[in-house]
């Protein structure tokens, strides 16, 4: 009895190690290490209980609870919950397929699955460990990008369907007991196992493709913003050259007013000269970061079209710490939300007040 208890605890430890190795293949550990350790501890407790005291539960109930605990472990790793849910279901599918493959082999050679249950569990875990190490060889520290819930739900159908199909196929083969059926079942288990293993590559490629598509759309926006920024600079330069061209004649006129002691006229003319409102539309944002300036000036023109006062106070270095792609999304969405709120709601004095500051760590 005591020996059986130690064996079950050891098997639970192996299961916990396997799930840890599996997740670290695709996801980085969360910054909160304590949370990750707590989640792994809960999984260990579940594994120990499921082996020793929860055998009365129906197989499908234990499978569902196991999936939940595998997802719980995923909370200790970085990444979106929908993507980690897909990887959790694939993990359970591969684990189940490994056990069924070993069970089918036992039936094929005439061994009792019930009598050699512990041996089958050990072999299936070793087999799963080999699979995880192979995955690490191809996907170690792979950058798993976030997919939408819809896309993740579609990817979940294969491992879920695999578990349902293989479970009933194994039950049927075990009930019939014919060697030919068992051979076909073992081959089917192996093929479905390979298909589920390929799902990792499919997920990585799909997420990378969608991320590339997102980056391309953002880069296209950046190009448009840079074009707008250059056009604004050109207009400002033309305005400045025009003012510079007339400067000599204006100074002569001022000198004439001064000699005639027409001080009031001279004061009015000087006030007219220093009126820089004609240049404001081109130089609202002058942070030194061309991307930020172009984006804000572009949104400023939109605000002017809807009679929305747009104020900005910027203090940002040229080398900004955030990636341009992410910066476009965050800043652009924030300003769009503010403009939309002013446009859709009738207010007396609509305005947008933008303040940005960046300080390096000392």
Image (cartoon, rainbow, N blue to C red):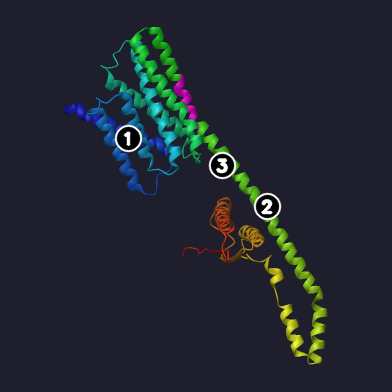
Which corner quadrant of the image does residue 129 belong to? top left
Alpha-carbon span between mark 2 and mark 3: 20 Å
Residue at 80% across, 80% down:
250
Residue at 27% across, 29% down:
50
Could you tell me which quadrant the N terminus lies in?
A: top left
Which corner quadrant of the image does residue 160 belong to? top left
- Circle 3 or circle 1, nearest the eye: 3
Magenta residues, as a range?
191-200
Query: Which residue position is annotated with label 3?
Result: 211
| Total marks in image | 3
- Circle 2 or circle 1, nearest the eye: 2
* Element assignment for label 1: helix
Q: Earlier in the sequence, mark 2 or mark 3?
A: 3
Drawn side of residue 121 relative to residue 309, left or right: left
* Element assignment for label 3: helix
Alpha-carbon span between mark 2 and mark 1: 51 Å
* Element assignment for label 2: helix
Query: Which residue position is annotated with label 2?
Result: 224
Q: Main secondary structure of the magenta part?
A: helix
Residue 277, position in %: x, y?
69, 71
Query: Which residue position is annotated with label 1?
Result: 16
Q: Is residue 135 above or below residue 28?
A: above
């Amino acid at each position: 009895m005591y020996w059986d208890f130690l064996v079950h605890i050891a098997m639970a430890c192996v299961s916990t190690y396997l799930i840890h190795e599996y997740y670290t293949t695709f996801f980085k550990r969360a910054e909160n290490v304590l949370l990750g350790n707590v989640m792994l501890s809960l999984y260990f407790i579940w594994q120990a209980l499921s082996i020793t005291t929860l055998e009365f539960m129906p197989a499908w109930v234990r499978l569902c609870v196991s999936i939940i605990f595998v997802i719980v472990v995923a909370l200790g790793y970085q990444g979106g919950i929908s993507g980690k849910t897909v990887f959790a279901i694939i993990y359970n599918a591969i684990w189940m397929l490994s056990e069924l493959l070993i069970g089918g082999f036992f039936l094929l050679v005439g061994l009792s699955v019930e009598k050699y249950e512990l041996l089958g569990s050990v072999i299936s875990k070793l087999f799963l460990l080999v699979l995880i190490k192979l995955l690490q060889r191809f996907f170690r520290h792979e950058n798993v990008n976030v997919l939408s819930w819809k896309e993740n739900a579609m990817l979940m159908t294969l491992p879920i369907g695999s578990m349902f199909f293989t479970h009933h196929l194994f039950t049927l083969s075990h009930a019939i007991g014919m060697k030919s059926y068992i051979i076909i079942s073992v081959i089917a288990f192996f093929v479905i196992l390979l298909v589920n293993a390929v799902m990792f590559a499919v997920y990585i490629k799909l997420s990378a493709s969608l991320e590339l598509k997102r980056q391309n759309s953002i880069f296209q926006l950046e190009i448009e913003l840079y074009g707008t920024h250059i056009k604004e600079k050109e207009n400002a330069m033309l305005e400045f050259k025009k003012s510079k061209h007339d400067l000599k004649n204006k100074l002569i006129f001022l000198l004439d007013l001064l000699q005639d002691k027409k001080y009031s006229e001279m004061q009015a003319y000087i006030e007219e000269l220093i009126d820089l409102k004609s240049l404001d539309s081109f130089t609202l944002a002058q942070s030194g970061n061309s991307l930020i300036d172009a984006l804000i000036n572009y949104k400023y023109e939109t605000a002017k079209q809807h009679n929305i006062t747009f104020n900005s106070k910027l203090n940002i270095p040229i080398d900004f710490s955030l990636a341009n792609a992410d910066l476009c999304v965050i800043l652009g969405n924030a300003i769009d939300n503010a403009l939309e709120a002013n446009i859709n709601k009738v207010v007396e004095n609509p305005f947008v007040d933008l303040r940005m500051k960046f300080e390096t760590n000392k």
